[in-house]
Amino acid sequence: MSQFRQENCDTRTGVLMRIGERIRILRGDLLQGEFAEKLGFHKNTIGRWERGDSVPDADNLAKILDVYPWVNPAWLVCGAGEMERRDFQAQSIEQNELNKSFLVNTQIIDHYLESDHYKDIPSKNRGLIYAKFHDHVKSGNSWNHFVIASIISEFYKPSFALHDYDIANKIRNLVDTKHKDLNSDSEKNVKYWEIFDEIDQRFCFFRAIAPNEVKKEIVSWIDSQITEAKEAR
């Protein structure tokens, strides 16, 4: 496996390689069709990944790592560290837990990118967003909807952006008030996006940091929903 060791930086450009380039390195001497068959994917899927037309989502990344368990997930997704897991032979419990956590992070981002609000984002940017979020979490920083939206917006400026901190907090307050029976973050995320969708429908012209007059209308609507939720209890 040592022949697969590569520098994480593309020396032609001086920037981190895209995930498709790392998949091409992982393929090695195999033809695209052979590699695709080994992974259980279609040949065209591998081609799109390597060209940068699309990127594997969290489920596909998990399949790749099932076939190539010695590959460092951090390297595969965002080019961090070396290609090989140094402790692969030892199968350390700590490393396995770290790998699982890493894939959970990519699934969190997938949840956001599958929202209608980001449906037009170039798929080749997904790997860059994975990397940015991974670096954020790896550094011990906390995250919330606002943080993730801000990270995504760095790579997709035209995205629908409820990136206003006050509004994001008010939506979370509405979820906590209206759905006090929900305990898991994943269930609360679903409700958060349902409210997000409703605001999109009611204020469909709102496509960037809200102009003051639009923000007032949104805040007023959320406050009325919070009041109704309290009265209904």
Image (cartoon, grey):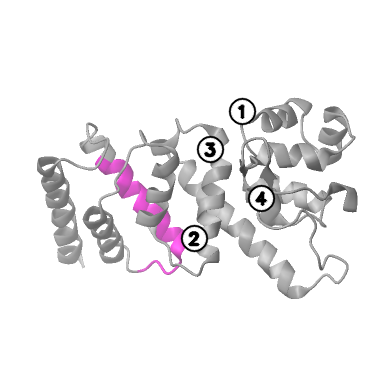
- The amino acid on which the numbered mark 1 sits, given as a three-letter code, is Asp
**Distance between the Cα atoms at labels 3 and 4?**
14 Å
**Distance between the Cα atoms at labels 1 and 3?**
9 Å
> Residue 53: which disc?
1
Disc 2 marks which residue? 136
Give, as a single range, the part of the protein colored magenta: 181-199
- The amino acid on which the numbered mark 4 sits, given as a three-letter code, is Gly
- Is any atom of residue 1 visible in this view? no
Side of 124 where 141 appears, left or right = left
Mark 1 element type: loop
Quick check: is 190 in the magenta stretch?
yes
Mark 4 element type: loop
Farthest residue toward the top? 44
Q: Residue at x 79, y 73 (%)?
A: 92
Farthest residue toward the bottom? 93
Q: Residue at x 84, y 47 (%)?
A: 4
**N-terminal label among 2 and 1:** 1
**N-terminal label among 4 and 1:** 1
Mark 1: give few (<14), some (14-19) or many (20+) Cα within 10 Å: some
Which of discs 2 and 1 lies nearer the camera? The answer is 2
- The amino acid on which the numbered mark 2 sits, given as a three-letter code, is His
